[in-house]
Image (cartoon, helix red, strand yellow):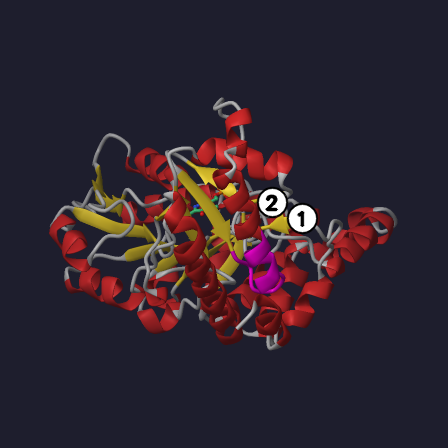
Amino acid sequence: MTAAQLDAQDELASFRDRFVIDDPDLIYLDGNSLGRMPKATQALLKQESEQDWGKDLVRGWSKWYGLPERIGAKIAQVIGGEADEVIVSDSTTVNLYKLVSASIQLQPGRTDVVTDDLNFPSDLYAISSAVGTNGSMNVVMSADKQSVCREEIEEALTDQTALLTLSHTSFKSGFVYDIAAITRLAHEQGIPVLWDLSHSVGAVPVGLKASGADMAVGCSYKYLNGGPGAPAFLYVRRELQDHLDSPIWGWFGQRDAFAFDLAYEPREGMKKFLVGTPPVLSLACIEPGVDMVLEAGMDRIRAKSIRQTEFLISLWESKLKPLGVTLNSPRDPNIRGSHVSFGHPEALRIDKALIEEMNVIPDFRAPDNLRFGVSPLYTTFQEIEEGVTRLEKVIGEKIYESFDSRKPEVT
Ligand SMILES: *Cc1c(COP(=O)(O)O)cnc(C)c1O
């Protein structure tokens, strides 16, 4: 089937019109890094500035104070949790630090945290700092640099392990763990599991509660389209909430913040994980994107995502593989998220050529990955095809050779 036919058959196609698309020629394949802006969010920002902050001023707080729970409850539906198990706060890295620290505190005698080298580096930094000098972070090394198998995780767990924490979908290869199987494996040894859902939420159904997972964190500005720097979320399964203490105490986590009591007493449930004043404008802007994901439904989003990454990989096979491009993501769609990594020794210069000369935005991930992210609410099949055609040209005609290999500060 042609790309145009696939688009014509796509039941989610109309969602694209609900995003701000300024340049129709731009092939945007980086929604897994920063999602596009929903038109509803643009309108909300206008309202925030003109009315909510502009006119209501401090009175706006009666509306803003409950936003972390209200939006958290909606994100819970996206990831398969209960409304009172998710709250929005801080960045993913900070939330991870809070939950890793809380988990270590929970288990006297157990000091170590197990993770893998597919995880996002910021997660490893946060884990290391939370582990401190009393324990160690044990990193399972992926043999093929793309995936890790169950046995490799099993071998790493010991009676010193306080926590297992992994990214559900790997930011580089797109590999997706079997969340229920890995959680079960750790639970058999009495070890809680904390998942980073940043590259899953809004793209890959998680089934968090059904998996038995203990805790999770994730990001709102990728497939949820919350906007640059929009705050992240935390999940703690209900039974565990009373046992975990946040390592950072602040007035938003205080039982009666406006009593201005000098002694700290945590709020109920997830609210104790709030710390200080949230970035209200960014926080509010998460909601329209989450609403759209709920309206489209995770099953339909996942089905389209698989059709699109399969389509992309079929184009790789016929057009890019003969040019020396490798597939650095799993071939099996059941263990692959919504982005595909291609390998080429000149990936950095190719990325620059695509962005600066071809009006295509993928991204480069060291050492040699070119990531093509598919965001089913607005990516079209024709866009994917055109992106591959332009990539083929950059490599085939060696257009990248006129770009230097200096790494920009941000890629
Ligand atoms: C994007 C991403 C993050 C982002 O962390 P911030 O602290 O919100 O910047 C963290 N972890 C993973 C796995 C990610 O993909």
Taking the image as shown, residue 165 lies to the left or right of residue 232, namely left
Q: Quadrant of residue 248?
A: top left
Question: In the rendered structure, which amino acid carries the disc numbered 1?
Answer: Leu
* Residues shaded magenta: 374-386
Nearer the observer, 316 or 173:
316
Q: CB under 8 Å between callouts 2 and 1?
A: yes
Vertical comparison of 299 with 30: above or below: below
Crowd rating for badge 2 (residues with CA inside 10 Å; few <14, some 14–19, many 20+): many
Residue at x-position 45% and y-position 53% = 319
* Residue 84 shows in the view: no
Vertical comparison of 44 with 249: above or below: below
Residue at x-position 59% and y-position 54% = 386
Residue 185 placement (x, y as % from top left) = 19, 63
Which labelled disc corresponds to residue 360?
A: 2
Crowd rating for badge 1 (residues with CA inside 10 Å; few <14, some 14–19, many 20+): some
Taking the image as shown, residue 90 lies to the left or right of residue 326, namely right
Nearer the observer, 131 or 35:
35
Taking the image as shown, residue 46 lies to the left or right of residue 134, namely right
User: Which residue is disc 1 drawn over?
Assistant: 26
Q: Secondary structure at mark 2?
A: strand
Residue 69 placement (x, y as % from top left) = 57, 61
Question: In the rendered structure, which amino acid carries the disc numbered 2?
Answer: Val
* Residue 358 shows in the view: yes
Residue at x-position 62% and y-position 50% = 27
Q: Earlier in the sequence, mark 2 or mark 1?
A: 1
